[in-house]
Amino acid sequence: MLMIARDLISFEEDIAAEFNASKIRAPVHLYFGNEEQIIKAFQKIRPQDWVFCSWRSHYQCLLKGVPPAEVKAEIMAGRSISLCFPKHRILSSAIVTGVLPIALGTALAAKRAGRDERVYCFMGEMTSETGTAHECIKYARNHALPIHWIVEDNEKSVCTDTRKTWNMKKLTYEDVSAPDITYYRYTSKYPHAGAGQRVQF
């Protein structure tokens, strides 16, 4: 099934309604406003490629080919922040920077085995400023690993502004022209977690 922007938005709106109706008893992190950018990113991602993401991964799962009903079932079961579908080669984690070293290792294994696969790793702008991210990106570059890093800047690092935290006017990978990194900035209608109505823990 080829997902278009309207499909992605409708899916998240459905999840937001379920969450606000107290039918999901676990955190959810919703996308909005980045449909064009993420669809463009997936134009290069093939079935044999791996995708790694953080706790906000609904769009990635849908675009990687996981049936919407399967994605929703996992979210309704309380696993929105740790969606993993090995059959479709997509894994996510609620741990900040948790998937970065795993993505790096997957790319290293692919290169050593000579397999025709690439790794795509999505991260938020705050994660991109961590030591783990810098070390993983440096190692991948120095060893020419088949991995591409995608930094998604929604200016919502929980309740803290990334630029103010690090006293930076411009982030490290912001507007950087590099073959192994894609950076994009977007504005979401949803808060960092939840859907804006139901009280979030």
Image (spheres, rainbow, N blue to C red):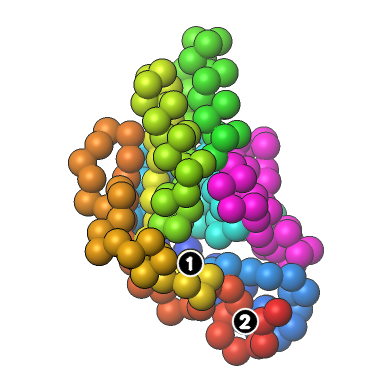
> Is 141 contained in the magenta span?
no
- Residue 135's x, y, as percent? 46, 35
Q: Amino acid at mark 1?
A: Ser
**Rendering quarter of residue 73:** bottom right
Q: Amino acid at mark 2?
A: Ala
Callout in the foreground (2, 1): 1
* Magenta extent: 72-99
Q: From the viewer's perspective, tell me whether residue 182 is left or right of residue 160.
A: left
Residue in the picture at 67% in, 87% down: 199
For the point 51% across and 57% down, the residue is 59
Q: Quadrant of residue 147?
A: top left
Which disc number belongs to residue 145?
A: none
* Disc 2 to disc 1, C-alpha distance: 23 Å
In front here: 191 or 66?
191
In this image, 199 relative to 5: left or right? right
Q: Report whether 152 appears left or right of 104.
A: left
Work out whether residue 61 can be spotted. no
Q: Which of the two discs, 2 and 1, labels the residue nearer the N terminus?
A: 2
Q: Nearer the viewer, residue 191 or 97?
A: 97
Q: Is residue 90 magenta?
A: yes
Q: In the figure, 2 relative to 197: above or below?
A: above
Residue holding disc 1: 157
**x then y, percent, for residue 194:** 60, 77
Mark 1 falls on what kind of element? loop
Where does label 2 land, which residue?
Answer: 17
Q: Say which residue appears at 44% left-offset and 26% top-offset.
A: 139
Find numbered disc 2 in the image and state the secondary structure of the residue it sits on: helix
Residue 65 appears at what percent x and percent y? 55, 45
